[in-house]
Amino acid sequence: MNIIIVENHIPFLEGGAERHSEGLRQALLKAGHNVEVVRIPFNWYPPEHLIKQAFITRMLNLQEVAGRRIDLLIAMRFPNYYIQHDCKVVWLVHPHKSAYELWDRPYIDLPRDPGGYAIREFILQMDRKHLREAKKVFANSKTVAERLKRYIDLEAEVLYHPPPNAEKLHCKTYERFIFFPSRISPLKRHALALEAIKYVKSPVKLVVCGRADSPDLLREFLESIKDVQDRVVYLGEVSEEEKIDLYSRCLAVLFPPLDEDYGYVTLEAMLSQKAVITCVDSGGPTEFVEHQITGFVVSPKPEEIADAIDRLAQDESLAVRMGKRAYEKILSMSLSWEYVVDRILSVI
């Protein structure tokens, strides 16, 4: 079949969503299909621009291109699921977050805009209508599926997938550091992690890696670690090989985001046989981490995170046991791209 995957393109920014679409492309190619990823430039500010982008995207019709029939269109993010196609499947990474679960968060731009409420209602109305055009709507996690149900009363089937380079992840040792690999962004809650490390009694360090979403956020983060510079190491952006090595050697992984859509970090940690410390409001990670079995799911309070770190640091055998259980748990879920391809193609 001729298949198009439609994704957003934000220049100079790349994250889990981009790796997600590339993984799907590779899996479909391996299954013998002709596949292209079409990337549509996306900018979410000023907020009024969202309405223009929605209408522009809706005007696109990708039934055929240059005389070649497109058999299947797979849309993954707002607003590309508005594109017209009579055989459209949605595998949703997330809807437009500031119109959904982040609407009442203080650092989100849309609620503060004078026309924010009307723009939000427009997005929800468009989503209610045009997501229902799809042959099937999949969500990449229960967290995302629950948002669709809560905000627009739409059912979506949860379809998990393995993280990039899953076959390369492994365990070497359990060294005296906690690993926090994530881009510097308010939603990842690095400030919470830095506050937590102040309460940790054990002689372990917090190793952080990942680029910042903006120069201002990087400056703010670098300023904040001065208070704990003897306990925190910031590596900046590292290569995939370096990240895999850090996973393989850490004592455990800390990942306390706010309402994460999926969270490759959790899966990568478990495949590296490492316990994960996350929070009750972290979204996607809580679908995989079992409290006190494969890690800790705690309140987003520095003291509780610190206590979880201390428990692992003071009892390495506990870290090893939890890590092995995490590995067994993720293997038992049989996450595979072959299954993803079978589910998506089964609905057409």
Image (cartoon, rainbow, N blue to C red):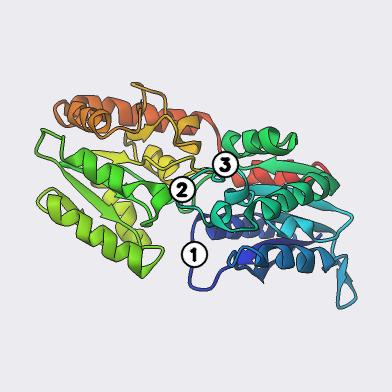
**Disc 3 residue type (three-letter):** Glu
Mark drawn on residue 106 = 2
Q: Nearer the viewer, residue 43 or 318?
A: 43
Q: Is residue 85 left or right of residue 264?
A: right
Q: Which callout, 2 or 3, points to the residue nearer the camera?
A: 2
State the residue position of label 3. 101
Which quarter of the picture shows residue 222? bottom left
Of the residues under marks 2 and 1, which one precedes in the sequence? Answer: 1
User: Residue 116, position in %: x, y?
Assistant: 63, 55
Mark drawn on residue 14 = 1
Rendered residue at 85%/67% (across/down): 61
Judging from the image, what secondary structure is the residue with disc 2 in?
loop
Judging from the image, what secondary structure is the residue with disc 3 in?
loop
Above or below 107: residue 320: above
Residue 157 appears in the picture as rendered: no
Q: Which of 69 and 187 is in front in this view?
A: 187
Of the residues under marks 2 and 3, which one precedes in the sequence? Answer: 3
Q: Distance from label 2 to label 1 (Cα)?
A: 25 Å
Rendered residue at 41%/43% (across/down): 257
Rendered residue at 41%/45% (across/down): 265
Q: Is residue 230 left or right of residue 55?
A: left
Q: Distance from label 2 to label 3 (Cα)?
A: 12 Å
User: Residue 328, position in %: x, y?
Assistant: 42, 29
User: Residue 101, position in %: x, y?
Assistant: 57, 41
Q: Distance from label 1 to label 3 (Cα)?
A: 22 Å
User: Residue 100, position in %: x, y?
Assistant: 61, 44
Above or below 176: residue 81: below
Q: Which callout, 2 or 1, points to the residue nearer the camera?
A: 2
* Crowding at mark 2 (Cα within 10 Å: few <14, some 14-19, many 20+): few
Residue 188 appears in the picture as rendered: yes
